[in-house]
Amino acid sequence: MRVALKIAYVGTGYHGSQVQPDVATIEGELFNALTQLEIIEDPKTARFSSSGRTDAGVHAREQVVAFDTDKPNLAIPRVINSKLPNSIWAWAHAEVPDDFDPRRWAISRKYRYIMSGEQYDIAKIRAASKLLVGEHDFANFCTKEGDKSTIRNVEKIDVRVSGTLTKIDIQANSFLWNMVRKIVTALTMVGSEVRDEEWLMQMLEPESYEEGLESSAAYGLTLMEVEYPEPIDWCEDAYAIRRATDNVHDYLVRHRVMAEVMDHLVPNE
């Protein structure tokens, strides 16, 4: 039987989602859990695949993975989570067709970038974001990988203000390496008036204009959702979600305390 999982994780402390030798990765932890529980023998024979990779420090709410198993009764979130660190958790599972490939079958992906927005003109960011929607050559907005096509279709960009934070949701058919973080860099450059919309339009014409962009910090980026052409009959695990809620609460408390600690480290003038 082929089983799919929805996986969430806090990417801090991991060298990305894709397994790598001698460093901590999301897939490495997941492979350890699945093999310890004897759900799979190894990733290759189980035809393990994921909906995409995330870089070091990037988070996910809905990374989709799939694998073959002859123990579907064990391939459920609450069992798998028993062998995972608190920073990674499965929260839904589904039986999928034998040829299901979470990356190739996906038709759309949505990322969210959260940043401090106090120093930017949000109206300028919103106006600039509209220029990026549609099919364009995003060669200036990615880290290139060989001869891979850099043409992508950005379906939607939504910019919202939440208190002192700005949330940028970007949805596309697929993304290039570092594409979201470089788009955010470009939008903040326009929002701070370092660059203008005319420059942004030039950036979408890489055959006549090239300029390198730094990637925005990884910690603000989250893979939010992956869409497929046919609905998948997901079974959400209420117990796993409750446990994840408790873990996230612990993270929030720790970071609120650390924010207060940091505020007291520098003497008042």
Image (cartoon, rainbow, N blue to C red):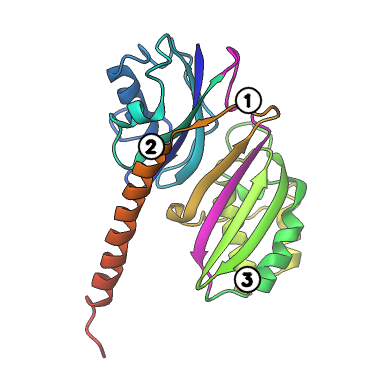
Q: Amino acid at mark 3?
A: Gly
At 54% from the left and 45% from the top, the residue drawn is 224
Q: Is residue 160 visible?
A: yes
Position of residue 181 measured from the top left corner of the image (x, y, whole percent)? 54, 52
Position of residue 117 measured from the top left corner of the image (x, y, whole percent)? 53, 71
1 vs 2, front mark: 2
The residues colored magenta run 96-117
Q: Residues within 10 Å of mark 2 (few under 14, many from 20)?
A: many
Answer whether residue 5 is magenta in the image.
no
On the image, numbered disc 1 is attached to which residue? 104
Displayed quadrant of residue 46:
top left
On the image, numbered disc 2 is attached to which residue? 240
Q: Of callouts 2 and 3, which one flags the residue occurring earlier in the amino acid sequence?
A: 3
Q: Of callouts 1 and 2, which one flags the residue occurring earlier in the amino acid sequence?
A: 1
Position of residue 75 measured from the top left corner of the image (x, y, whole percent)? 41, 21
At 30% from the left and 41% from the top, the residue drawn is 86
Q: Which mark is residue 191?
A: 3
Which quadrant: the C terminus? bottom left
Per the image, label 3 sits on a secondary structure element best described as: helix
Displayed quadrant of residue 264:
bottom left
Q: Is residue 212 visible?
A: no
1 vs 3, front mark: 1
60 relative to 132, above or below: above
Q: Residues within 10 Å of mark 3 (few under 14, many from 20)?
A: many
Disc 1 versus disc 2: distance between alpha carbons? Answer: 28 Å
Q: Is residue 129 left or right of residue 244?
A: right
Q: Amino acid at mark 2?
A: Ala
